[in-house]
Amino acid sequence: MELLNNIVRADGNLNEEIILKKEILYKGMNGRFVERFYLTPSTSYIFKPLTNDGQLGKEVWVHEHILPIFPAIYPKIISYSISERTDLNWMILEDLGPLSHEFNEESVMGVIKWVAWWHSLPIEELGNVPVTGLKPKIEEIVSDVCDKKDEFYRLLPSLKIEEELIDAIFSQINHLKFLEKKVLTHGDLHTGNFAIVGDELKILDWEHTHLNSPYWDLYHLIDMSHPLFPKKITNPLRDRILESYLSLVKFEIDRDYFFKEYYLFATMFSMWMILLIQKDLVENGGKWSVEQLNTQLEETVSSLQQCAAALIL
């Protein structure tokens, strides 16, 4: 522990005089890099500075208060620093090795087993779990989409979305209240945050853990698109995933109501995502390339169309 603390300088950066080499894994939202570093040719760790300034201290809290009751499906923290200065916050985690981020039925069915497990944990026994995550709550997302209804309708021709589908979504949103049940959620369960390591499944990046609707994790796993991790979802696969979840989760919910609510949740979230992606495209990409954003847009439109069509059957 003491040795690893010395690897990070007082300014919150890796001490390159001590490490053998390092490699960038990804860039955080605040511009800081998550890196793999080596002490010897065969000994490596992951250096993760605070990558989102609004999440100060949250991932360490989750690792200390929530993840100890989990099986070994996450990388463990070896050392960390928490400071009021955001640039002095960092963690050193065990290096799981090469990660395979693939969205396929086998990997997703492996993830859904654990999602159902942590959704079934009694939240009253978990302590002061955060009640908000990185993104707005679904109620705020719905409100935002409704406020931008005209803007969304103007996009329909270019997106090749039938107006009747969107009419049907808006006609239902005022008549269906989302499930009030709250569960422990990972919070950001897109394809980049789960991986196969050898033959084992690992779930990564727990800093967005909070209490939310069961549909939150389900949407991020199944229908949330990401610029770096293209994927393809189909109606039959989506339904198999949802059926598997229902068979595993430990609370009771009517199947038909569950499916209808999920489709509505997913359509509203996808509409909100489309508006965000479109904004990024107008601004010529920003963090992501235009090509990545166009791929993400296509995936999100496809999910929206599939879920909207299933909703009105």
Image (cartoon, rainbow, N blue to C red):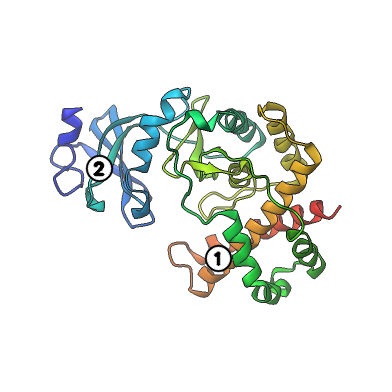
The kind of residue tagged 2 is Ile
Q: Which element is circle 2 on?
A: loop
Residue at image coords 38%, 32% = 63
Residue at image coords 69%, 73% = 158
Marking on residue 276 = 1
Q: Indicate left or right for 179 with 65 as reference.
A: right
Q: Earlier in the sequence, mark 1 or mark 2?
A: 2
Q: Indicate left or right for 75 with 42 as reference.
A: right
Q: Residue furthest front?
A: 124
| Residue 226 position within the rendered picture, expressed as x and y whole percent measured from the top left | 54, 53
* Quadrant of the rendering where the N terminus is positioned: top left
Q: Residue furthest right?
A: 313
Of residues 177 and 233, the one nearer the viewer is: 177
Residue highlighted by disc 2: 82
Callouts 1 and 2 close, C-beta under 8 Å? no
Q: Indicate left or right for 296 with 203 as reference.
A: right
**Distance from Cα at disc 1 to Cα at disc 2:** 32 Å
Marking on residue 47 = none
**Can you say whether 283 is above or below 112 in the image?**
below
- Disc 1: CA contacts within 10 A as few (<14), some (14-19) or many (>=20): few
